[in-house]
Amino acid sequence: MAEYPQDVVQRFHGTPEQVDAGLVGDPPRTWESVVIEEYDPAWAQRFTAVRSSLTEALGALIIAVEHVGSTAVPGLAAKPVIDIDLVIEDADEESGYLSALERLGYRLVLREPWWHGHRMLLSAAEDVNLHVWPQGAPEPVRHRLFRDWLRSHPHDRELYAATKRRLARDTAHRPRDYSLAKNDVIDEIYARIFAA
Protein backbone atom coordinates (compact mmCIF):
# COMPACT_ATOMS: atom_id res chain seq x y z
CA MET A 1 0.00 0.00 0.00
CA ALA A 2 1.38 3.40 -0.97
CA GLU A 3 1.79 6.00 1.75
CA TYR A 4 0.41 9.45 1.03
CA PRO A 5 0.80 12.60 3.13
CA GLN A 6 -2.25 13.43 5.26
CA ASP A 7 -2.96 16.62 3.30
CA VAL A 8 -3.26 14.50 0.13
CA VAL A 9 -5.49 11.89 1.76
CA GLN A 10 -7.74 14.44 3.51
CA ARG A 11 -9.86 15.96 0.73
CA PHE A 12 -11.26 19.48 1.04
CA HIS A 13 -15.02 19.78 0.52
CA GLY A 14 -15.95 23.33 -0.38
CA THR A 15 -19.37 24.85 0.11
CA PRO A 16 -21.50 26.92 -2.27
CA GLU A 17 -20.93 29.88 0.07
CA GLN A 18 -17.16 29.53 -0.27
CA VAL A 19 -17.41 29.37 -4.05
CA ASP A 20 -19.59 32.50 -4.05
CA ALA A 21 -17.13 34.25 -1.72
CA GLY A 22 -14.27 33.46 -4.11
CA LEU A 23 -16.09 34.52 -7.26
CA VAL A 24 -14.42 37.31 -9.22
CA GLY A 25 -16.81 39.07 -11.60
CA ASP A 26 -19.64 37.23 -13.32
CA PRO A 27 -19.97 33.46 -13.03
CA PRO A 28 -19.13 31.54 -16.20
CA ARG A 29 -21.95 30.65 -18.60
CA THR A 30 -20.78 27.03 -18.26
CA TRP A 31 -22.12 27.08 -14.69
CA GLU A 32 -25.68 27.64 -15.95
CA SER A 33 -26.17 24.06 -17.17
CA VAL A 34 -24.40 20.72 -17.09
CA VAL A 35 -24.04 18.86 -20.37
CA ILE A 36 -22.27 15.50 -20.29
CA GLU A 37 -20.83 14.40 -23.65
CA GLU A 38 -19.20 11.20 -24.80
CA TYR A 39 -15.40 11.24 -24.73
CA ASP A 40 -13.83 13.25 -27.55
CA PRO A 41 -10.16 12.67 -28.53
CA ALA A 42 -10.04 16.37 -29.50
CA TRP A 43 -9.94 17.17 -25.77
CA ALA A 44 -6.38 15.83 -25.54
CA GLN A 45 -5.42 17.90 -28.59
CA ARG A 46 -6.94 21.02 -27.01
CA PHE A 47 -4.86 20.42 -23.88
CA THR A 48 -1.68 20.07 -25.95
CA ALA A 49 -2.37 23.40 -27.67
CA VAL A 50 -3.12 25.14 -24.37
CA ARG A 51 0.00 23.72 -22.70
CA SER A 52 2.08 25.07 -25.57
CA SER A 53 0.60 28.57 -25.24
CA LEU A 54 1.05 28.52 -21.45
CA THR A 55 4.67 27.46 -21.79
CA GLU A 56 5.30 30.24 -24.28
CA ALA A 57 3.60 32.87 -22.09
CA LEU A 58 4.93 31.87 -18.67
CA GLY A 59 8.16 29.98 -19.39
CA ALA A 60 10.24 29.33 -16.28
CA LEU A 61 7.40 30.30 -13.92
CA ILE A 62 5.80 26.93 -14.65
CA ILE A 63 6.59 24.02 -12.36
CA ALA A 64 3.99 21.69 -13.89
CA VAL A 65 1.08 21.71 -16.35
CA GLU A 66 -1.25 18.70 -16.21
CA HIS A 67 -4.44 17.77 -18.03
CA VAL A 68 -6.75 16.62 -15.22
CA GLY A 69 -10.45 16.04 -14.76
CA SER A 70 -12.71 13.86 -16.84
CA THR A 71 -11.59 15.14 -20.25
CA ALA A 72 -8.13 13.70 -19.42
CA VAL A 73 -9.48 10.14 -19.16
CA PRO A 74 -9.94 8.37 -22.52
CA GLY A 75 -13.39 6.82 -22.75
CA LEU A 76 -14.89 8.89 -19.92
CA ALA A 77 -17.98 11.00 -20.64
CA ALA A 78 -17.49 14.58 -19.47
CA LYS A 79 -18.50 18.18 -19.64
CA PRO A 80 -16.63 19.49 -22.71
CA VAL A 81 -14.43 21.78 -20.61
CA ILE A 82 -10.72 21.01 -20.27
CA ASP A 83 -9.43 21.19 -16.68
CA ILE A 84 -5.76 22.05 -16.40
CA ASP A 85 -3.64 22.26 -13.25
CA LEU A 86 -0.93 24.89 -13.56
CA VAL A 87 1.56 24.72 -10.69
CA ILE A 88 3.77 27.75 -10.04
CA GLU A 89 5.83 28.78 -7.03
CA ASP A 90 3.24 31.11 -5.47
CA ALA A 91 -0.34 31.50 -6.75
CA ASP A 92 -0.84 34.52 -4.46
CA GLU A 93 1.71 36.49 -6.51
CA GLU A 94 -0.81 37.29 -9.24
CA SER A 95 1.32 40.14 -10.60
CA GLY A 96 3.78 37.53 -11.89
CA TYR A 97 1.35 35.62 -14.11
CA LEU A 98 -2.14 37.10 -14.32
CA SER A 99 -1.51 39.74 -17.00
CA ALA A 100 0.28 37.16 -19.21
CA LEU A 101 -2.73 34.83 -18.92
CA GLU A 102 -5.16 37.68 -19.61
CA ARG A 103 -3.23 38.42 -22.82
CA LEU A 104 -3.94 34.80 -23.81
CA GLY A 105 -7.66 35.48 -23.33
CA TYR A 106 -8.16 34.06 -19.84
CA ARG A 107 -10.14 35.83 -17.15
CA LEU A 108 -9.88 35.28 -13.41
CA VAL A 109 -13.09 33.63 -12.15
CA LEU A 110 -12.21 32.31 -8.68
CA ARG A 111 -9.75 33.43 -6.01
CA GLU A 112 -9.77 30.94 -3.13
CA PRO A 113 -6.88 31.58 -0.73
CA TRP A 114 -8.45 29.20 1.83
CA TRP A 115 -8.10 26.30 -0.65
CA HIS A 116 -4.30 26.12 -0.90
CA GLY A 117 -4.23 29.48 -2.73
CA HIS A 118 -6.30 28.18 -5.66
CA ARG A 119 -7.08 30.50 -8.55
CA MET A 120 -9.27 29.52 -11.50
CA LEU A 121 -9.19 31.27 -14.83
CA LEU A 122 -11.48 30.62 -17.76
CA SER A 123 -10.57 30.76 -21.43
CA ALA A 124 -12.38 33.23 -23.68
CA ALA A 125 -14.28 30.36 -25.32
CA GLU A 126 -15.13 28.99 -21.84
CA ASP A 127 -13.77 25.59 -22.87
CA VAL A 128 -10.77 25.60 -20.48
CA ASN A 129 -10.75 25.86 -16.68
CA LEU A 130 -7.18 26.80 -15.76
CA HIS A 131 -6.50 26.01 -12.09
CA VAL A 132 -3.45 27.78 -10.69
CA TRP A 133 -1.86 26.19 -7.61
CA PRO A 134 1.22 27.00 -5.55
CA GLN A 135 4.07 24.53 -5.38
CA GLY A 136 3.36 21.87 -2.75
CA ALA A 137 -0.44 22.14 -2.88
CA PRO A 138 -1.99 18.68 -2.37
CA GLU A 139 -4.89 19.12 -4.79
CA PRO A 140 -2.88 18.68 -8.02
CA VAL A 141 -1.46 15.45 -6.55
CA ARG A 142 -4.99 14.19 -5.87
CA HIS A 143 -6.13 15.21 -9.36
CA ARG A 144 -3.33 13.17 -10.97
CA LEU A 145 -4.03 10.15 -8.75
CA PHE A 146 -7.75 10.28 -9.63
CA ARG A 147 -7.08 10.72 -13.36
CA ASP A 148 -4.56 7.88 -13.48
CA TRP A 149 -6.81 5.56 -11.47
CA LEU A 150 -9.76 6.13 -13.80
CA ARG A 151 -7.52 5.56 -16.82
CA SER A 152 -6.59 2.10 -15.53
CA HIS A 153 -9.78 1.03 -13.68
CA PRO A 154 -12.70 0.68 -16.11
CA HIS A 155 -15.22 -0.25 -13.40
CA ASP A 156 -14.66 3.02 -11.53
CA ARG A 157 -14.55 4.94 -14.81
CA GLU A 158 -18.02 3.59 -15.67
CA LEU A 159 -19.30 4.19 -12.13
CA TYR A 160 -18.14 7.79 -12.31
CA ALA A 161 -19.64 8.33 -15.78
CA ALA A 162 -23.01 6.89 -14.74
CA THR A 163 -23.03 8.99 -11.57
CA LYS A 164 -22.23 12.16 -13.52
CA ARG A 165 -25.04 11.53 -16.00
CA ARG A 166 -27.51 10.89 -13.16
CA LEU A 167 -26.41 13.97 -11.21
CA ALA A 168 -26.56 16.16 -14.33
CA ARG A 169 -30.24 15.17 -14.60
CA ASP A 170 -30.90 15.45 -10.85
CA THR A 171 -29.35 18.93 -10.56
CA ALA A 172 -30.74 20.32 -13.85
CA HIS A 173 -32.79 22.87 -11.90
CA ARG A 174 -29.70 23.89 -9.83
CA PRO A 175 -26.65 23.19 -12.03
CA ARG A 176 -24.24 24.84 -9.59
CA ASP A 177 -24.98 21.95 -7.18
CA TYR A 178 -23.59 19.42 -9.67
CA SER A 179 -19.92 19.58 -8.63
CA LEU A 180 -20.63 19.25 -4.91
CA ALA A 181 -23.12 16.44 -5.58
CA LYS A 182 -20.26 14.33 -6.99
CA ASN A 183 -18.40 14.30 -3.65
CA ASP A 184 -19.78 10.94 -2.45
CA VAL A 185 -18.69 8.95 -5.50
CA ILE A 186 -15.37 10.82 -5.69
CA ASP A 187 -14.65 10.03 -2.03
CA GLU A 188 -15.61 6.38 -2.63
CA ILE A 189 -13.11 6.15 -5.50
CA TYR A 190 -10.41 7.96 -3.50
CA ALA A 191 -10.87 5.44 -0.70
CA ARG A 192 -9.97 2.69 -3.16
CA ILE A 193 -7.04 4.68 -4.52
CA PHE A 194 -5.56 5.26 -1.06
CA ALA A 195 -6.16 1.64 -0.01
CA ALA A 196 -4.46 0.20 -3.12
Image (spheres, grey):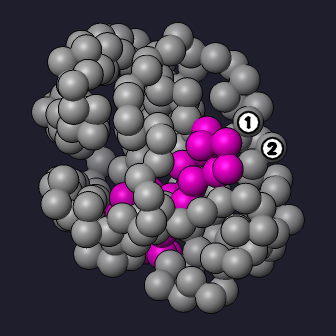
**What type is the residue that disc 2 sits on?**
Ala
Check the image and report above or below for 129 versus 169.
Answer: below
Q: Is residue 80 visible?
A: yes
Q: Residue 66 placed where, x, y %?
A: 60, 50
In this view, the residue in front, 104 or 147, is: 104
Asked if residue 129 lies in the magenta stretch, the reply is yes
Residue to which mark 2 is pinned: 49
In this view, the residue in front, 58 or 142, is: 58
Identify the residue at image location x=33%, y=77%: 113
* Residue 46: mark: 1
Identify the residue at image location x=42%, y=68%: 24
Check the image and report above or below for 153 versus 127.
Answer: above
In this view, the residue in front, 28 or 70, is: 28
- Mark 1–mark 2 distance (CA, rounded to whole Å): 5 Å
Circles 1 and 2: CB atoms closer than 8 Å: yes
Check the image and report above or below for 16 versus 34.
Answer: below
Quadrant into which the C terminus falls:
top left
Q: Residue 119 placed where, x, y %?
A: 46, 68
Binning the other alpha carbons within 10 Å of mark 1 as few (below 14), some (14 to 19) or many (20 upward) gives some
Q: Quadrant of residue 43?
A: top right
Q: Quadrant of residue 188?
A: top left
Q: Secondary structure at mark 1?
A: helix
* Residue 147: mark: none
Instruction: Find the magenta span and give its range.
Output: 121-141
Q: Secondary structure at mark 2?
A: helix
